[in-house]
Image (tube, rainbow, N blue to C red):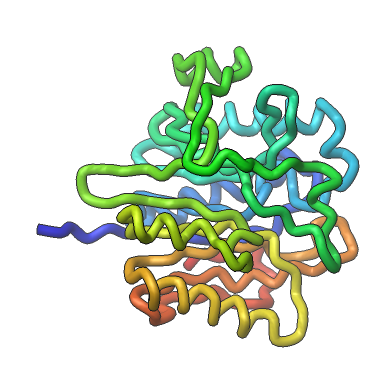
């Protein structure tokens, strides 16, 4: 017999290289999610360092400070008893990836790298990141010592995988993967995934929000289940404006949607 689960997605006004400010907004969103009874919290793409770091992604300090923020998140009592899905750059085998880091109770469950890069129009992700092309494969990723001391893990799974529990199965997508013709959620749905998540850094454009809603709805029309989308809001110190609009879809219907434009730094759905 199935169980009910409460899930949370959010819209954050993050800033490039504002590590302390980004940390506080992430913690605030997790706190709100827990207060609402959520057991899973999804955040936007590259929320720890900010999406618009541009060539600062080449700097080792950007990676270092991202892991320092991750360490504070792991140690914080706010993150206890809730699965946290956060975004940051990770270097694996000397290659830089745009990743989701999923953890629970000071244990990293999975580092999931982005497989499809946004590299047209306003986006130049291939300048800074490499797409993960080993589909349905994982490797051991050696954690920095500061993280090992907290998690008591030397290595964690890194790659294209899903999370399975006794009750359900969760699969993660990152922004552009939803827009690709061969979206990961297709194979995930065939493999039994019931909860799909998408961490986005999607900018504002006329009628783009309508298309984003249609894509999310179509995923759960085809596969059934639940689809959560999180997005950034604000300018992130760059020339683009991200328009929020976090949402949750169940079986083809939008059941929760955050505002597209707001002066609040943290908006939950």
163 left or right, relative to 43: left
Q: Position of residue 162 (x, y in %)?
A: 41, 44
Q: Residue at x 74, y 48 (%)?
A: 50
74 left or right, relative to 234: left
Dividing the picture into quarters, in which one does residue 174 lie?
A: bottom right
Name the one closer to the observer, 24 or 17: 17
Q: Is residue 233 visible?
A: yes
With respect to residue 164, does 212 lie above or below? below
Q: Which residue extends farthest left?
A: 1
Total number of numbered labels? 0
Dividing the picture into quarters, in which one does residue 214 lie?
A: bottom right
With respect to residue 58, does 87 lie above or below? below
Dividing the picture into quarters, in which one does residue 71 lie?
A: top right
Name the one closer to the observer, 104 or 180: 180
Q: Position of residue 80 (x, y in %)?
A: 39, 36
Q: Is residue 7 visible?
A: no
Q: Residue at x 72, y 53 (%)?
A: 117
Q: Position of residue 236 (x, y in %)?
A: 80, 57
Q: Residue at x 40, y 35 (%)?
A: 104
Q: Residue at x 60, y 67 (%)?
A: 181
With respect to residue 208, does 119 lie above or below? above
Quarter of the picture containing the N terminus is: bottom left
Name the one closer to the observer, 19 or 107: 107
């Amino acid at each position: 017999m199935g169980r009910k689960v409460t899930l949370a997605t959010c819209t954050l006004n993050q800033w490039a290289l504002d590590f302390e400010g980004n940390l506080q907004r992430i913690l605030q969103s997790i706190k709100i999610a827990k207060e609402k009874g959520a057991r899973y919290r999804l955040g936007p793409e590259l929320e720890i360092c900010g999406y618009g770091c541009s060539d600062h992604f080449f700097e080792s300090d950007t990676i270092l400070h991202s892991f320092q923020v991750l360490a504070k998140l792991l140690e914080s009592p706010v993150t206890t008893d809730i699965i946290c899905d956060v975004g940051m750059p990770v270097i694996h085998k000397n290659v830089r990836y745009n990743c989701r880091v999923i953890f629970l109770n000071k244990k990293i469950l999975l580092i999931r790298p982005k497989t499809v890069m946004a590299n047209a129009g306003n986006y130049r992700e291939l300048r800074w990141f490499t797409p993960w092309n080993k589909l349905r494969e994982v490797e051991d990723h050696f954690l920095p010592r500061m993280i090992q001391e907290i998690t008591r893990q030397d290595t964690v799974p890194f790659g294209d995988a899903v999370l399975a529990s006794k009750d359900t199965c969760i699969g993660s997508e990152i922004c552009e993967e939803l827009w690709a013709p061969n979206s990961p959620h297709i194979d995930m749905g065939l493999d039994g995934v019931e909860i799909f998540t998408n961490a986005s850094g999607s900018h504002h454009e006329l009628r783009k929000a309508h298309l984003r809603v249609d894509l999310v709805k179509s995923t759960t029309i085809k596969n059934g289940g639940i689809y959560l989308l999180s997005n950034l809001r604000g300018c992130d110190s760059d020339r683009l404006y991200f328009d929020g609009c976090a949402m949750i879809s169940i079986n083809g219907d939008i059941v929760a949607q955050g505002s597209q434009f707001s002066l609040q730094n943290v908006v939950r759905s």
